[in-house]
């Protein structure tokens, strides 16, 4: 195997390439451009170039040559290599640090030893050389005791020099990432085993959101981005091209779909290759991307079907089981209105014997002029309420883009009635790994509701709780009509637990407790009810919100054996 590197024998690029091909023959090259040329011309079978150092960042010459040389599709990345980099300062035998006036090395290596040089050799002249090993060679040739080189330890032995100090790099974890490449024709014949990465270069359309959309195309499909760099476009000042490194290979459906979307947003799009990732000592690598459901075979029996699990699914949320022996009581305000208000309400829920806290931070309101929720602040207050009371938290997520944000604070993601068939949202919520509370759409049939649950299950998330919250009928005396048929029917058809939201079904608080008890009689695994410390002044859904006394009464009926914990302390 002949491998072209920038630099000469003993350079760090050679050590990197040897981690991949122990028996290689080095083809030394003066510049990165010559490395590419050597592979193109067949003088080398592969090339190996440093792309990034953990101390000083990008090796920009490599980034630029990747753009220049890979655009026509004739070259392909095949491997990455991570190499721990330790530097030694070396000089002629007999010389010592006090004699040194000039230090030679590759500029990247000088940059990695800046602190040591400042402390031990302040004021000496630093001279850039083509490579580290080559600078050791120069020091030996010049035979000048005032010269030193910074290079790998073995370069001292190779050139008859002696180390003046070792490990002179600014951080002992110093390492460099190298990329190996070959011709596309050769790469075609190689099989890539193990976890892959893919690198690409894109020049995005110059419009708001183009970069965000590219990242979201990856994020929405669970594709991890491991590096993102930008380089200026030389012919168009103040415009940039972006270099993405992502986990996964182009043949994986998830990756292929995301790249198709990014390409559609790009003026220029170059895939540098899918290649074997270096996983040694890299703890965060996500090894596999599950296949999206629409690329998988349709199961003979739907995943939600009770025949698959006659005993029923129990969804575990922290210490709480939904679908187990005891009904669960989830309660809280329609919207989180302020920190004090949600902490007070959480105290009331906990003291009355409630099991879990609800509260909307992102609210789906019929009118755009109505209170839309406190957003991120609301999420933070909910998390604080959980810390204070120990109650797990469920809150609604309105759009797929906000799933990671809401998932960071919630224990269960609520998909609201208005979004029951927002399939992109269902997929994203499923991939969060959190349990999903799937409310039934006000105009959705039981079949449609079950298929919405199937979306979440098919994405690999088994933790779905169904929630009947009333459907729209001709009856206008109540907000919606609670469909208890559906509760029993879904329990027959599916193994998923079903809970009931009598508050949104009724729209008036006086009906909530009777409907709640009827729901439990119909087989519901629990309830989610709206409760507000001061319903008359609630910012949303006050008419259907129970006051604390009504809620205490409901809680005592749901959990008759559980003594209430007494009056809570007020929030400071
Ligand atoms: C809510 O729970 O506050 C809510 C908006 O519910 P639904 O989606 O059932 O209307
Ligand atoms: Mn509400």
Image (cartoon, rainbow, N blue to C red):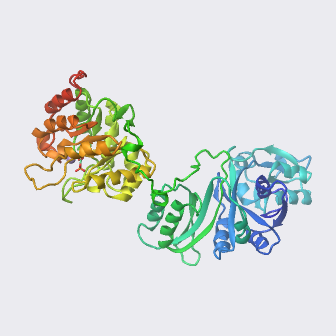
Tell me the quarter of the image containing the C terminus: top left
Which quarter shows the N terminus?
Answer: bottom right
**On the picture, is 258 further left or further right than 248?**
left
- Residue 541 visible within the image: no
Q: Position of residue 297 (x, y in %)?
A: 48, 57
- State the image quarter where residue 400 is shown: bottom left
The spot of residue 479 in percent (x, y) is 13, 50
Measuring 60% from the left and 63% from the top, which residue is drawn there? Answer: 199
| Residue 272 position within the rendered picture, expressed as x and y whole percent measured from the top left | 63, 67
Left or right of 439 on screen, residue 254: right
| Residue nearer the viewer, 302 or 100 | 302
Residue drawn 24% across the image and 38% down it:
527
Q: Is residue 372 visible?
A: yes
Looking at the image, is 299 positioned above or below residue 205?
Answer: above
Q: How many marks?
A: 0
User: Residue visible at 38% across and 31% down?
Assistant: 319
**Residue furthest left as drawn:** 477
Residue sitting nearer the eye, 312 or 460:
312
Choose between 440 and 63: the one closer to the eye: 440
Give residue 182's quadrant in the image: bottom right
* Residue 13 found in image quarter: bottom right
Residue 331 percent across, percent down from the top left: 24, 37
């Amino acid at each position: 195997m002949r491998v072209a590197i920038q630099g000469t024998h003993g350079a760090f690029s050679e050590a990197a390439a040897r981690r991949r091909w122990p028996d290689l023959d080095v083809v030394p090259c003066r510049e990165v451009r010559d490395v590419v040329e050597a592979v193109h011309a067949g003088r080398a079978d592969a090339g190996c170039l440093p792309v990034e150092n953990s101390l000083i960042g990008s090796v920009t010459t490599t980034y630029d040559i990747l753009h220049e040389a890979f655009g026509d599709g004739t070259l392909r990345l095949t491997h990455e290599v991570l190499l721990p980099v330790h530097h030694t300062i070396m000089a002629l035998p007999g010389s010592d640090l006090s004699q040194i006036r000039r230090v030679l090395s590759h500029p990247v290596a000088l940059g990695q030893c800046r602190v040591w040089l400042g402390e031990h050799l302040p004021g000496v002249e630093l001279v850039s050389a083509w490579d580290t090993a080559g600078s050791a060679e120069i020091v030996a040739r010049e035979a000048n005791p005032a010269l030193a080189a910074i290079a790998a330890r073995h370069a001292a032995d190779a050139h008859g020099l002696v180390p003046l100090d070792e490990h002179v790099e600014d951080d002992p974890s110093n390492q460099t990432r190298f990329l190996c490449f070959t011709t596309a024709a050769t790469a075609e014949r190689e099989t890539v085993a193990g976890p892959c990465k893919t690198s690409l270069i894109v020049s995005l359309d110059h419009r708001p959101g183009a970069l965000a959309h590219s990242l979201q195309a990856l994020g929405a499909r669970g594709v991890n981005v491991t590096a993102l760099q930008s380089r200026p476009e030389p012919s168009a000042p103040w415009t940039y091209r972006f270099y993405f490194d992502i986990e996964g290979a182009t043949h994986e459906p998830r990756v292929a779909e995301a790249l198709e979307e990014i390409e559609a947003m790009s003026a220029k799009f170059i895939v540098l290759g899918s290649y074997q990732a270096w996983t040694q000592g890299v703890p965060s690598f996500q090894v596999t991307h599950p296949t999206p459901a629409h690329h998988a075979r349709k199961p003979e029996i739907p995943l939600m079907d009770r025949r698959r699990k006659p005993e029923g699914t129990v969804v575990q949320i922290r210490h709480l089981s939904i679908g187990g022996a005891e009904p669960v009581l989830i309660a809280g305000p329609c919207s989180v209105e302020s920190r004090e208000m949600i902490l007070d309400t959480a105290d009331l829920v906990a003291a009355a014997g409630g099991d879990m806290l609800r509260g909307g931070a992102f609210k789906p309101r019929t009118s755009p002029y109505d209170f839309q929720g406190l957003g991120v602040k609301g999420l933070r207050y909910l998390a604080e309420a959980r810390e204070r009371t120990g109650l797990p938290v469920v809150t609604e997520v309105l759009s797929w883009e906000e799933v990671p944000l809401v998932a960071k604070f919630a224990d269960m993601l609520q998909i609201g009635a208005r979004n029951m068939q927002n399939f992109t949202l269902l997929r994203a919520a499923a991939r969060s790994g959190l349990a999903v509370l799937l409310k039934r759409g006000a105009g959705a049939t039981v079949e449609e509701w079950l298929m919405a649950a199937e979306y979440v299950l098919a994405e690999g998330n088994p933790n779905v709780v169904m929630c009947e919250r009333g459907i729209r009928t001709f009856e206008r005396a109540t907000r919606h009509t609670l469909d208890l048929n559906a509760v029993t029917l879904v329990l027959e058809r599916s193994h998923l637990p079903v809970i009931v939201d009598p508050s949104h079904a009724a729209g008036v608080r006086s009906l909530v407790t009777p409907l709640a008890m009827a729901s439990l009689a119909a087989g519901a695994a629990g309830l989610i009810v709206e409760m507000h410390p001061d319903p008359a002044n609630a910012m949303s859904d006050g008419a259907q919100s129970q006051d604390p006394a009504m809620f205490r009464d409901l809680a005592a009926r749901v959990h008759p054996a559980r003594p209430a914990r007494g009056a809570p302390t007020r929030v400071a």
